[in-house]
Amino acid sequence: MSSNDNPFASNQGGYSSQNVAFGGGNGAGQPAMGGAPGAAAGDLIKDTTTANFQADVIAESRNQPVLIDFWAPWCGPCKQLTPRLEAAVRKAGGKVKLVKMNIDEHPSIPGQMGVQSIPAVVAFHNGQPVDGFMGAVPDSQLEEFIAKLAGSSSNAQDEALEQALEAAVQAREGGDLNRAAQIYQMILQQMPDNAPAYAGLAGMLLDAGETEQAKQMVAQAPEGIAESAELASVKARLELSEKVAGLGDPAEMERRLVANPGDHDTRFDLAQLKNAMDDREAAADLLLDIMKADREWREDGARLELLKFFEAWGPTDPATVKARRKLSALLFR
């Protein structure tokens, strides 16, 4: 996945491993807190000039399609088309942007593009012209044109996003934390409210022992993803990590259980430690053992804690799947 064919890459070709170093407190790998690392420039509809054409149209089309409307004050059909074009762009809800250029004041760009009559509308995507039309077309044709452009862009962006998230997971699982953090940050530059990327970065901070930074990131999550399943998993991990602090030595706990198998308090604490040590199956089995012996212990506390483990691990984790089967067999035997 290269920066050239991924709309989440920066206009400068993306990050290199020298730009971002994961971990280390306030190092370059620290995610920006409390807002978007980078917001899309410009308004939904704007006028442009020859000097600003590169930024307003070419560069901005890497974020979403941009329509450029070539017009002139003396052009009657332009006066008919432009208001309807603006309305159709607003109706698209940000999936496309509109940039208008007065060809009398800025003749060089339309000249370079071979525009011979107006109104003329050209669609740019990923820095290239991809479609267009001339004349004051009917509203139905106008909306169909924009819907087609917005739809093809959304499909391509969705595919690129999926590829980027998959690459981040692979890098993370392979131990290349710098690369994983770079990809997550690259996504968040374009989509600051992307829950998988935001939670992925927060989870990496937690994995690295940067608990306070992870808590801060979770606390400052954008409103739209604050209650997402991805963030809920990180929150559950933070809660569990706080519980295990100072619980004690697991070997000593195991000795106590051998001496007193009915010591469910110790068994419960040991489950917390096993989970913190990433021995998920053992953690689940300890809680299930409590349930087998005493379902009402701490008002069904073992089952409720196991459900928190499931939330922290994720529904598809092998430990979650296996323990859910055991839990179902226990509850419905």
Image (spheres, rainbow, N blue to C red):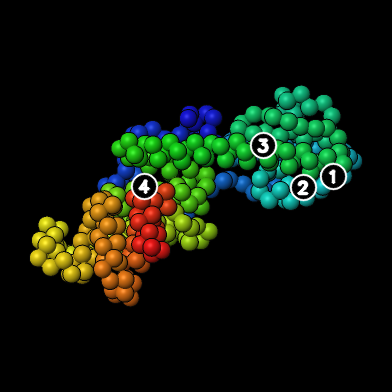
Badge 4 marks a residue whose secondary structure is helix
Q: CA distance from mark 1 to mark 3?
A: 20 Å
The amino acid marked with disc number 1 is: Asp
- Residue 319 position within the rendered picture, expressed as x and y whole percent measured from the top left: 34, 50
User: Which residue position is annotated with label 4?
Assistant: 318
Mark 2 and mark 4 lie on one chain; the one further toward the N terminus is: 2
SS of the residue under disc 3: helix
Tell me the quarter of the picture where residue 276 sits: bottom left
Q: Are the residues at dot 1 and dot 2 in contact (C-beta closer than 8 Å)? A: yes
The kind of residue on which mark 3 rests is: Ser
Q: Identify the image quadrant of residue 168.
A: top left
Q: Which one is nearer the viewer's eye here, 239 or 327? A: 327
Q: Identify the disc placed on residue 152.
A: 3
Of labels 3 and 4, earlier in sequence is 3
Residue type beneath disc 2: Ala
Q: Is residue 53 above or below residue 36?
A: above
In the picture, measured across the screen, residue 187 lies left or right of residue 69, that is left
| Residue that appears at 46% across and 49% down | 196
Of badges 3 and 4, the one in the foreground is 4
Q: Earlier in the sequence, mark 1 or mark 4?
A: 1
- The label on residue 88 is 2
Circle 1 sits on which residue?
Answer: 139
- Is residue 264 depicted above or below 276 in this figure? below
Q: Mark 3, mark 2: which one is toward the viewer?
A: 3
Q: Secondary structure at mark 1?
A: helix
Q: 10 Å neighbourhood of mark 1: few (<14), some, or many (≥20)?
A: some
